[in-house]
Structure formats: structure tokens, C-alpha cells
Image (spheres, rainbow, N blue to C red):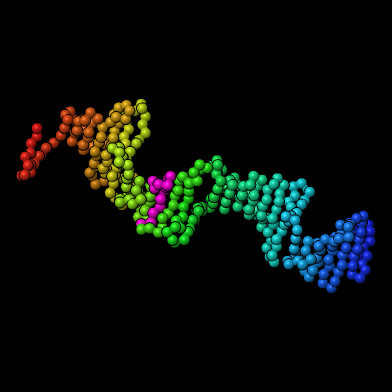
Amino acid sequence: MADIKGRTLAATYRKLLYTADDDGLEGNTSATTSVITTDDGDGTSTASCLNLGIDRIGIGTSAPGQLLHIKSTSASTTVMIETSNNGSDATLALKSSDNQWNINSKEGGTFDIADEGTSVRMTIDGAGQVGIGIEAPEALLHLNVTGSVIAPATGSLLVLEDTSGPCGINILTGKTATDDPFISFGDEDAAEQVKIYYEHDQSPELLHFEIGGQDRMVLTNAGNVGIGTAAPREEFHVYDSATTATSGNLLIQGNHNSEEVGNHQSGLLFKIDSADDDNKKKAGIFLKRTGWYGVGDMHFALENTASEDNVDLSTDTKMIIKGSGQVGIGITAPAQALDVKGSLRIEDDASTDTAIL
């Protein structure tokens, strides 16, 4: 016997029957199965909607293939777990013999996955941001191993955090020539404007920095850097493929204070030593500012003592070319077009005439 809406449902020959208004509910049982079908009132019954088989429940099917089998003949199938209590979660718990995971829908539109200890492992907030290891993601994808310590830069879509150790991205591909791993940057007008990629099927192996489909800089596995060339011949190789009169230039620029004429210089230093320190820079070529708009003198300097000292323009200039065009050797204030302090030797070649005019 069963009671439905205050009416008694009687069992007759393993069959249960209940009718209310134009709707009907009919059930029958067997040794292994209980089936309940519905009648819409016109004498026709739907397919079985509940099948209680051996350790299986079927909703919408009389032949459940799993412990719980839900089937719908409509375009989509929905299973809902709902709570009307404010502040409470709607939770689906998945438990094995000794572990449990909870899938939660929280007030405010947050979805998360938590372990048995209720530690949230993944979150999707109401804005669609995904956090792994963090409950309040601050980017479209935010991965966190330890606690967040700083806010990410504005516009960040991916944030990786680990304050306890190294944090990085590992990109691995196959071995063939077409499998070069890369990172590209672009916008809606150009799908790929800037590309950094590793050319591994090459000797030497190369790291390319490409803009607009053209190599702008490469780094070889030997440490050579090429700008404008994919085959740098030295540690630093600059190449300009243009054939104009101004191509192939290298610019070294220093900042300046317009109020301090004479106190600023830009230059190129030379050092030969195994120590990775800031000492023993023994030679240099410098432009020292002497006037407005960056005008100045060129200094060629050498520091020639066996010491830790670096080259110093005030004491080590061996040759100078003044902004006025005068050249001094051994003197920093030449008074003539060529002013030499010390002896001057000119030696002729037996096959040519030698003269000073």
C-alpha cells in the first residue's frame, strides 16, 4: 500500500495504479524490476520514466546502463541541484573509498571544485575568470601555488604565482623541423605581429625574435647575438641589409642634464679578464660633451697599470679629437691641427718617398 496525495495506491497482481483528474501514474513490479509509467489522460502511456533495476536507477529509460542513468528525448538534458537557503552551496559530492571531491555552486555566481578538506582547488567566478589554487582570480586564468603577494598588471589574462620557488612555463614540441616552439603577439588587425621562436633543427640552434615576418634579432646556442642577421659571426653582429649611405650604424646614447655641460659622456669600454666584476676596464672610446646640442670631443683612453683600476678620461686619454677638428696625441688641449707631445718619428719605405708638407 502507498499513499499519494491522500489517496491509496493498491497493489494488485504486482501492479500499482493511481488516477487523479486526467493524469495517471501506473506501476508494476517483477522479481528484479519496478517500472513506473505516466499516462497523459488520453489512454496513451509514455516510455518508462523510472526503472529500479538491480543496483541501477533509470530516469527516462527502462534499461539503465549505469548506477544512475538519466535520458531525455528533448534537445538537451538538465539535472538540477538547488538550494533556497541564502548563503548555502548547491553541492555535488563525488566520493571514492577514501577520498571525496565537492563541486559547488555558490551564492554570487561562483563555481568551484574543492577537496574533502574543503580546500578550493579551482574557481570560476561570475566574470568568467578561472583560478587554480586561488579562490579570487585576478586574471582570465590565474594559477597560484602559494599565497598571492602582489596585484597583477592591468590587462593581465594569465598570471602565474609561486612565492616559494621558481615559477615558469615549459614549452616542448616534437623533433622535426616544423615543430619549432614559439610565443606570438598580435592584435585584431594582424594575427601575428611579433614572434619569439626556438629553431632547434638547426646548427647552431637559434632563438629568433621576429617582427612583421622578418628576423630582427637572433641568439645562438653559442651565445652570439645577431641584429639584422640570422648568422652572427661574432659575439655581437649588427647587419643592415639596406644599401643607403646611412645604413649599418650603431648608436650609443647617454642622457644628459642641460645645466651640466662637460660632465657627461657616452662611450664604448673594453675589458679582457675572466672576473665577472666592475673592475679592470682598461680601454675606451668616448664622446665627452662640451657644449649645447650634444657637441663634444672624442677621447681614446688607455689605463696601463697592473691594478683593478678602470680607465679614466681625466688621466688616461692618449689621443683626443676636438670638436673643432684639432687632434692631440699625448695632450688633451691641442693648439694645432695636429699637436703631439713627445717625439715624433716618421720612417720612409725604400720604395716610396716620405715627406711632411
Residue shown at 34% from the left, 36% from the top:
253
Q: Position of residue 262 (x, y in %)?
A: 30, 29
- Asked whether residue 303 is in view, the answer is yes
Q: Position of residue 86 (x, y in %)?
A: 76, 46
Instruction: Return the residue found at the far bottom.
Output: 31
Question: Is 119 placed left or right of 206 in the picture?
Answer: right
**Front position in the image: 170 or 282:** 170
**Front position in the image: 164 or 153:** 153
Q: Position of residue 189 (x, y in %)?
A: 50, 41
Residue shown at 87% from the left, 67% from the top:
28
Q: Main secondary structure of the magenta part?
A: strand
Q: Quadrant of the N terminus?
A: bottom right
Q: Is residue 208 magenta?
A: yes
Which of the 4 quarters of the picture holds residue 179? bottom left
Q: Quadrant of the C terminus?
A: top left
- Asked whether residue 308 is in view, the answer is no
- In the displayed structure, 308 sits above or below 338; it is below
Q: Position of residue 254 (x, y in %)?
A: 35, 35
**Front position in the image: 204 or 332:** 204
**Front position in the image: 41 or 155:** 41
Give the magenta-colored segment's residue range: 204-216
Question: Is 153 placed left or right of 276 in the picture?
Answer: right
Q: How many marks?
A: 0
Residue shown at 8% from the left, 41% from the top:
347
Q: Is residue 205 magenta?
A: yes
Residue shown at 44% from the left, 56% from the top:
180
- In the displayed structure, 94 sits above or below 90; it is below
Question: Is 260 placed left or right of 151 in the picture?
Answer: left
Question: Is 202 placed left or right of 190 in the picture?
Answer: left
